[in-house]
Image (cartoon, coloured by chain):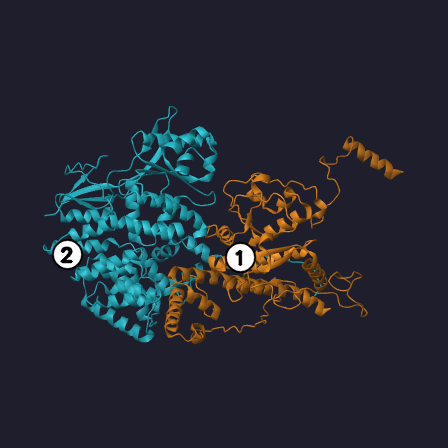
Amino acid sequence: MWRFLSKCKKLVLDAPNQQKLRTFCTNGNVDVSKISGGDEALEHKLKVIILEADVMRQDGKTVPSPEFMTSDHWSELLKLETRSSRKKYLQFLFKVEKKKEGQAQKKEIKRVERESQDFEPNVDGAMRYDLGHNNIFLRFFDSTINHMYNNKLMQAMQFGQKIVIDCGYDENMTKRENINCAKQLMFCFAENRIHNDPFDIHFSNCHLDRDLIKYLHKHIPTMYDADFPMNIHEASYLDMFPKNELVYLTPHCREELKEYDHNAVYIIGAIVDKINNEPLSLAKAKREGLKMAKLPLDRYLQWGSGAGKSLTLNQMISIMLDIKTTGNWEHSLRHVPRRKLVNHEMQPSKFSNYRQTEVSNVKKSTSSWKPKGDPKNNLLNLRKIMNE
Amino acid sequence: MFRSVFARSFKSGVLLNVYKRQYAFVRERRNPESIISTLTSTKITTSEDWEVVKNKIFNDFNTIKPSNIDAVVLTNCINYKHYDLAENYLEYLKKSGVEYNLATIGKIFKLNFCTQNESKGKDSKRNTHETLYAMYEQVKGKYGTLDSITNEHVIMGLSVTDKWEICKDILNEIKLTCVPNSIAYSCTVKAAFQNGQFDYAWNLLNEMLEKNRKPNNMCYIAYIDKCIEDKSISLEKLFEFLGDNDLICDWELIQNLRKYFQETKFVKITQKGLCTGCKKVIPRIDLSDEEFDVLKSKIFERVIVGKDVFRNTSPSELQLFQKMMNKNINYDVVIDGLNVAYSAGTKTSAFVNAHLLSSVVRYYIEQNKKVLVLGRTHMERWPKKYFDFIRANAEIFLTQNISKDDPYLLYCALHAGSNAIIVSRDLMRSHVYLLKENHHKRLFTRWLTQSQHQLVKVLDNGDVIIKKPLPYVETTQKVDGYWHLPYYTVENQESVNWMCLKLK
């Protein structure tokens, strides 16, 4: 079984799970030489930056306490070039610290409350019969469900349509955008896995030593396991698939994707372009001479004013999954957030049984039920019945 | 683990306190005056009074603790100009034997600067100079290299003493971690002017502008005072500096200038560029040929090609463009086709768009000018009548629909020379930003403001109303020995007023 699974797995690089040792610094005990990597100039700069943070703390600014700061935080501070960016990063860390403190306090309160609740002692040694304890129902364990989803993905790898997510844009995004992109990639993978008919997703152009894939690894720690159904490639999609099958989906081009092609390999660019709005995916597709297409958003949806036409990656994957399954654009484009459109009412879809959440088939009547006749009469009738 | 649902219950009272503490710093940031009002509400003379006030602050403000109370109190006193209260607090600290932390020491230097400014330096105590310098030496010895915040405060404090020359080294120390702020630079420049080191001061001012730090008025005022003191130093250098760097004075600077000159006039400059004061016409400032070449190459490198030529255009399109440029025809007018066509709105029909553009083209053809129109290939689908007219009477360059046409427009207009007209309503600010150096940005905006015609309206009968540019540049400049200075008043920061004066 394992051999079969590992054959299906198309992992290119086998990176071991690294457990990072976090060095907490207490009362100014920062491991300066480790963070600066032996460079004297950097070491000097780091010492000055530590002093700067201390002065800001003494000045009453929002700076976290020394116990909270880790080596990773200091090395991130060292990379930032301006004082204002350092100040903003320290403010972010302060908020994180306070949030953690708040959560710890809440946890403490709940713990005290839980322990103060008296349970009935076991009567004659009988078991505790409860939803959370012993009951007649079979439990759905997480691992069982996960095995079912993974099995679906394995089948998709063998028989399903391939789709490429181009992760090569990490240098064009800031650190925060990279973190957001990694989270979207994680959602992408999850949405795909849960669907009835998943894609075989290939993450191409991945730089394993850079932020994007590192943060994705934090979200999905088992990413590099041999038996985990995720395809991560350092190579480009041009080396993996024939050029005539590739279609790059980019919002900056003119041609709309009118009909979904089941033989094409679509490419989605993993960019979060909040800050930089240059047409990077268009430029890449032009340079590589690939076919380009964009989703027919304007044709089927009335876009509201002031709403950006950028869609997140998980929304894209959901749309592609639905268009593959149904071929109906109106149904597929339900994944576009309604707040971006002009009228916010949800249009009911005729393919409602494809939805993941159970939609009740009971028809909701528009008029509320009212008793017939005079209420006083009803009371009299009731008395009559009771006196019989 | 099996999936299960935990019932959640919160004790709302205790939790509310948690939430209160979580967002306290946000609350305190939104009411910055609350601390100073606590400090000034009661009269404070003795140490016990201070203890009472301090306890009140600890109770009211969650973010202020014993570790940061000192610096916070001093900052608030200094910011709201209660210098006596600050001195009072420092004495209380000395009495209670508390060691000053680094932030407090920084505030001491800042306080010295502020009090010296208030007393206009008449009250220079030699004692403070020595004690300040001793304090600096002690702190420097303890920490080795100081951080940028403390260093900036030290510069402020030492610049008003006779040990100001150390500020030069401190500036270099700040540059290890960040670019020094405007105050640090300005204090050093002011001290340099006051002590006669003019070359150093002007170099530092130029450095400031390169690093986008706006010089504080104290620099200029120090120079003016020096000129009053020593008549051999001319104010020309200051005016040249203001003119070269497109710096517009504010009211405070104008007041200081008036105390130097007795005969300054507040004037108006007419539409034709005539000064009502000295009756001379302010000319255009034309860019030289070399400056045009520099701008053209920068536009080509940074705006058209940029980091990746495929982002704005493509190599094949670039080649076509270069072929057209090599024909070397000197155009008089370069029209931004799309900007003109959509000047009545983006949802207008092709008929309206084509009509607008052809009217503008006709307007310039009737003045016997050579016209070049830039646009995109979808313009070929416009009504034949209009497009054929444009094609017959003007040269057209169309880029692909997915390419940007603006960079090509700028290059063509620059190529056409100093008398060329560019017709567009777009101020090209995003393209100015891409020319990273301030010098190039200044040249570009100077050229654009003098060459840009903006389409206002096209009337029903076909007449075109165009907004022509001012025939002069709004910057400090000399005309026949008379200096004209633009300035902003306190009330009006949008349009410039002018002052005219003659240096002897």
A159 left or right of B118 in image = right
User: Are dots 2 and 1 in contact, CB under 8 Å?
Assistant: no
Which of the image's four quarters has the N terminus of chain A? Answer: bottom right
Residue at 33% x, 30% y is B363
Q: Amino acid at mark 1?
A: Asn
Amino acid at pointer 2: Lys
Q: Chain of mark 2?
A: B
Q: Quadrant of the rendered structure where residue A88 is?
A: bottom left
Using the image, determine if residue B473 lies above or below residue A52.
above
Left or right: residue B477 versus residue B299 is left
Give the left or right position of residue B323, taking residue A163 as reference.
left
The answer to whether residue B296 shows anywhere in this view is yes
Determine the residue positioned at 25% across, 72% down: B134
Expressed as whole percent of the image width and height from the top left, the position of residue A315 reads: 59, 50
Q: Position of residue A36 (x, y in %)?
A: 42, 72
* Circle on res. A180: 1
In this rendering, is residue B180 above or below A370? below
Where, by quadrant of the figure, is residue B195 drawn? bottom left
Residues at marks 2 and 1, common chain? no
| Residue B216 placement (x, y as % from top left) | 26, 54
Q: Which quadrant: the C terminus of chain A?
A: top right
Q: Residues within 10 Å of mark 1 (few under 14, many from 20)?
A: some
Chain to which the residue tagged by mark 1 belongs: A
Left or right of B17, for residue A231:
right
Q: Please tell me the colour of chain A.
A: orange
Q: Which residue is mark 2?
A: B226
| Residue, far right | A388
Around disc 2, counting alpha carbons within 10 Å, would you say few (fewer than 14), some (14 to 19), or many (20 or more)? some
Q: Colour of chain B?
A: cyan
